[in-house]
Amino acid sequence: MLFSSPLFGHGPSRLLALVRSARRAVEDRKRRFHEDRVLQPAWRVQLGLTHARRLCRGDQKVREIRRLLDAQGYQRTDDQVAFHEEQLRAILPLIYGDEWGQECERVMREFGINKIEKRILIFARRRLGKTW
């Protein structure tokens, strides 16, 4: 159990140990992100790059869009990544163009969606970075 012992007591504080552990986890996540600037690890699975298959033009376009978003010289927040992913899902048929008919089932399965929602409405505070 996480809180079975008191947070404040004799010796090092349990709360301080939890804060240090959380800080190390965040630093580790940032380090892993910076090691892979082109594709974040979860995107490899979504794009099928863990399998031995050839990327179609649409896959290459999605890969390039993600690379350009990550190459802006700053680290996007989790909310910004989520906004961009929702926007990508909405325009997948436009990105894939003529290939959409033959690739739609695979792409939708890789993106984890059952239906393309063409309209997106995002409510977020300004400090989340949507107006950066």
Image (tube, rainbow, N blue to C red):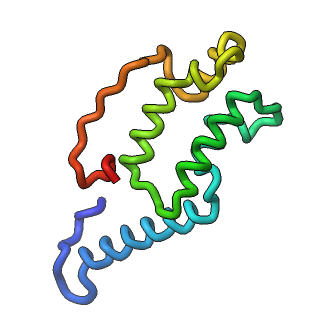
Residue 1: x, y in percent?
Answer: 30, 59
Indicate whether 64 appears above or below 29.
above
How many marks are shown on the rendered structure?
0
> Which residue occupies the foreground of this view, 93 or 110?
93
Indicate whether 95 appears above or below 80.
above
Indicate whether 33 appears above or below 68.
below
Indicate whether 110 appears above or below 42.
above
Q: Quadrant of residue 124?
A: top left
Residue 118: x, y in percent?
Answer: 43, 18
Residue 122: x, y in percent?
Answer: 29, 33
Residue at figure coordinates x 67%, y 10% from the top left:
101
In this image, 131 relative to 86: left or right?
Answer: left
> Which residue occupies the foreground of this view, 115 or 90?
90
In this image, 5 relative to 47: left or right?
Answer: left
Residue 53: x, y in percent?
Answer: 81, 32
Outermost residue, top direction?
101
Residue at figure coordinates x 49%, y 16% from the top left:
114
Residue at figure coordinates x 29%, y 62% from the top left:
2
In this image, 118 relative to 124: left or right?
Answer: right
Outermost residue, bottom direction?
11
Residue at figure coordinates x 52%, y 63% from the top left:
73
Quarter of the image with the C terminus in it: bottom left
In this image, 104 relative to 90: left or right?
Answer: right
